[in-house]
């Protein structure tokens, strides 16, 4: 029973390029959450998705960032025209249909470095 | 909005001594509280949760936490620290958002256990 799978583990992008981060939730989990961890900082909520729906994107920057969770395939966090300040660890978590009452299962994260 | 506060950026403990990592919360209604641990370059791992019932919650790796309603606290404890407990610890609270819920994390506390 594979856990939450994130890839790539490490991603290096030049300023202005696009970054695409992928997250496959645990089997049976239909809720996906994305968090960002800046160096020496805590976890900041970005977006909460269910299949084909964005439920809460209150933590997403207004520009350049988008997320989707299609009917088939993984959830994608997309960052367009990356800047150095986007360098961070991006974590995905999933939970079963009853939501996060019982906590999340986290992936190992994608560490984005913008050079 | 729900929130948690972790007043200490870092806690230093000698191996074999008891450890406490502090967390206070601010919620409306009954709190659902969680502790997670993050080892270097890894994702978050669930330690324990409080939803209802006994105020003393036992979790993984010998950790426990005490829910204290009068002090709005949920401190993490371990009777005898190990060097391998050195990691980043996050307290979290469930926030209800229009019928859905998500976890809000504290800023994290870095625990350093010295031999």
Image (cartoon, grey):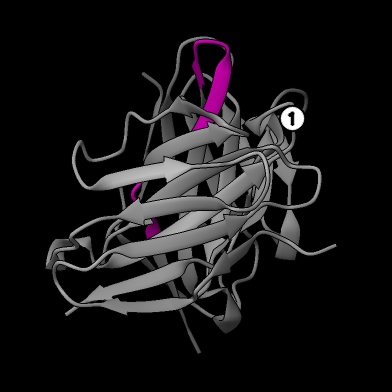
The quadrant of the image that shows the C terminus of chain A is: bottom left
* Vertical arrangement, residue A77 with respect to residue A31, above or below: below
- Look at 43% across and 26% down and name the residue there: A56
Task: Tell me where residue A89 sits by quadrant.
Answer: bottom left
User: In front here: B47 or A97?
Assistant: A97
Give the main secondary structure, helix, strand or loop, of the magenta stretch. Answer: strand
Whether residue B109 sits left or right of residue B39 in the image: it is left
Q: On the picture, is B19 further left or further right than A46?
A: right
Closer to the camera, A34 or A13?
A: A13
Position of residue A2 measured from the top left corner of the image (x, y, whole percent) = 78, 64
Label 1 crowding class (10 Å Cα cut-off): few <14, some 14-19, many 20+?
few
Magenta residue check for B24:
no
Q: Is residue B105 magenta?
A: yes
Q: Which element is circle 1 on?
A: loop
- Is residue A90 something that shows in the picture? yes
The quarter of the picture where the N terminus of chain A appears is bottom right
Residue B73: x and y, percent?
48, 32
For residue A107, above or below residue A114:
above
| Residues shaded magenta | B96-109
Residue A27 shown left or right of residue A73 in the figure: right
The answer to whether A59 appears left or right of B20 in the picture is: left
Residue B39 drawn at (x, y percent): 52, 73
- Read off the residue under disc 1: A97
């Amino acid at each position: 029973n594979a856990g939450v799978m994130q890839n790539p583990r490490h991603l290096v992008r030049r300023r202005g390029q696009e970054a695409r981060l992928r997250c496959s939730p645990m089997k049976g989990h239909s809720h996906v959450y994305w968090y960002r961890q800046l160096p020496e900082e805590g976890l900041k909520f970005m977006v909460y998705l269910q299949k084909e729906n964005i439920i809460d994107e209150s933590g997403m920057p207004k520009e350049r960032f988008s997320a989707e969770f299609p009917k088939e395939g993984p959830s994608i966090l997309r960052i367009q025209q990356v800047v150095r300040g986007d360098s961070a660890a991006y974590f995905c978590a999933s939970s079963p249909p009853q939501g996060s009452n019982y906590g999340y299962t986290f992936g190992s994260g994608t560490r984005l470095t913008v050079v | 909005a729900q929130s948690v506060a972790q007043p200490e950026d870092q806690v230093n403990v000698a191996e074999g001594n008891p450890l406490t990592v502090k967390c206070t919360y601010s919620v409306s209604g009954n709190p659902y509280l969680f502790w997670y641990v993050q080892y270097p370059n890894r994702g978050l791992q669930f330690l324990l949760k409080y939803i209802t019932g006994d105020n003393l919650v036992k979790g993984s790796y010998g950790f426990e936490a005490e829910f204290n309603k009068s002090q709005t606290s949920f401190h993490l404890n371990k009777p005898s620290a190990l060097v391998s407990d050195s990691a980043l610890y996050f307290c979290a609270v469930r926030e209800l958002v229009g019928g859905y819920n998500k976890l809000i994390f504290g800023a994290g506390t870095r625990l350093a256990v010295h031999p």
